[in-house]
Structures are given as C-alpha cells and as structure tokens.
Amino acid sequence: MNKFEFEKNRRVAEFCPCGKSNHDGKFAPFVGFGDKGHCFSCDKTFFPDKDVGKAMSKQKTTIALIPHKHSFISYDIFKQSRGMFEKNTLLNFIRDLTNDETALRIKDSYQLGTAKLWDWSMVFWQIDSRGRVRDGKIIKYILKKDDSSFLGVNCGRDKETIPPVKWVSKLAGVKDFKLQQCFFGEHLLPLFPDKPIGILESEKSALIATAYRPDILWLASGGSGGLTDQKVKVLESRKVTLFPDLGKFDQWKTRAAQIEKLIHVDISVADFLERIATEQDKIQGLDLADFLLRSKWNCSSTR
C-alpha cells in the first residue's frame, strides 16, 4: 500500500479533482501534489497514477490510508437539511435564550440541520474531525412550561414521538450503511486546538452550554454509554472535563480512569451538580443545561 502525507495547508490546492472549489478546505492534497489527495466533501481519494518517487522523497512522516470500515452521508443529503431554520423549535428556543447573532453562530458552528420529518425536527449531524459526515440524528423538540427556567419554558424532546430518534441514513434509505458514531461537535476539534473541552451526554445541552460558556468547546457523547474507545481517541493530548447527568457521576468517573489508560489526556469529572442538586433533581436526572437555564443571567449578552 502506498503511503502519503497530507499537506498541512489544504488551500494550496484551489480545486478538488472532482471539480469543486476548495475554498472550504475540504480537499486535502498529498505533499508534492496539487491534484492528488482526499476530498472530504465527495469522500473520494485521488491517488497518483505515475511514479511517485519524487513526491515520496519529500515526505517527513507517513500515514496509511486504509479502507473505510464505516459509511458516510453524501454532501447532497447533508446540504438539503441546511434551510428552514425559522421552523426549528430548538433553534428558536436558543435564539430566545440568546439573540439572533449568537443563535446563528451556534447553528453554523455545529452545522445544525432541519428535517421535515415530525413537523420540522432538529438534525444533529455527527461530523468527524476530518470533516466527514457520519450520520444525522433527528429529534423532535417541543416547548414545555418550566417554572424553574428563567424563560418560563424549556425545550425538550417530544416523548410522544415514536421512535424518539431517527437516523438520516435510515430515512434516506441508504443501502448497506455502516454507522460508526463520533462525538457531536467533533469537527470543531481541529479548529480550536487550545480550547478546553467539555463533554455532556445531550446534543441539546451542548448547544445551551455553548451559549453560556463559549470559552469551552462543548461536545456531546449521545448518551451515558457514549464514551466509547473508538470515540475518545480524538481527545488525545487535550484537556477534558466530563459533565455527566445526575445519577451518572460514578459511571463516568470510572470511565474517565479507563480513558486515562487508553490515551494521553488531561481528564476530570465535574461533581458540582451532585453537590448542589436536590433529591427531586436527582430523580429527574437533570443535567448541566437544566441548571444553566435556572440562572437569572440572560446569556443574550454572550458573543
């Protein structure tokens, strides 16, 4: 198998061999080539078809490109979800919580989508650190009265929706799709290499935490069991704080110790929710976002 190193500056290539502009840096050329490399938009690898000895001599280190063991969503399917945000209940809630500018920044940063399914539901796209779309998780949200929130309402899943989650790959009827999940928000890791990382279970909570604490890069595991060996490898050499839902502290404390043995990472588990929560809070299994929404501080001033 030939081995090639990618150029660190992707924009040395103006176009991808597939014909698309490389203004977004989705095409990563190999060192020594302007038209050979991997396009994370069309998910194709363009290998040199002639003698590569000259280019290979420029390599300092090499990486092996191995066949994908999982599938990806096409850019066309992803693009179809990027409109109709005015009908998205959760995005409108975040706008009311903050302001138009902050809501737009969060929407674009996390590449959020809207699906027609279930009357305009949220699409949480799982995009990995290489810019590939693993899949999209569709969830319907509704506003609920909540006297503990300073807004008087909260935005939660519609529990009457069955099933509660639908995957885009299933909805689109993609054949033989092999899903391997990644962190929600993982695509932001290369963009903010020095930011401390906070990990929550819920994607919605990661968005709300971002509104309050934009100095932290918030990811979501997608559930208490979502800190898998495969996912956590991208946290190598980062500073990470886990924020488990109430009732999951011991589970994530144990998992943090296991992750430390798996990779080199500065990891800790926040316990302040366990210390301040009431018995009713614990019964409900509240998370960080629920407590943030209790604050009288309106994060509309956040930028």
Image: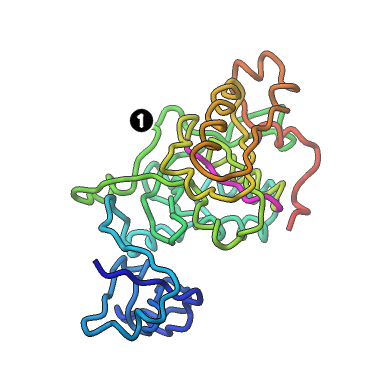
Residue type at numbered disc 1: Ile
For residue 249: magenta?
Answer: no
Q: Is residue 72 found left or right of 286 in the rendered image?
A: left
Looking at this view, is 273 or 121 the one in front?
273
Q: Is residue 276 found left or right of 11 in the rendered image?
A: right
Q: Residue at x 54, y 61 (%)?
A: 190
Circle 1: element type:
loop
Colour scheme of the picture: rainbow
Q: Residue most toward the left?
A: 175
User: Vertically, is 245 above or below 169?
Assistant: above
Q: Is residue 161 found left or right of 11 in the rendered image?
A: left
Q: Residue at x 34, y 43 (%)?
A: 167
User: Vertically, is 44 above or below 280?
Assistant: below
User: Vertically, is 289 above or below 170?
Assistant: above
Q: Residues within 10 Å of mark 1 (few under 14, many from 20)?
A: few
Q: Which residues are magenta?
A: 215-222
Q: Residue at x 53, y 55 (%)?
A: 110
Where residue 227 sits in the image (x, y, percent)? Answer: 48, 36
Which residue is label 1 attached to?
162
Where residue 6 sits in the image (x, y, percent)? Answer: 42, 72
Q: Residue most toward the top?
A: 279
Q: Residue most toward the right?
A: 297
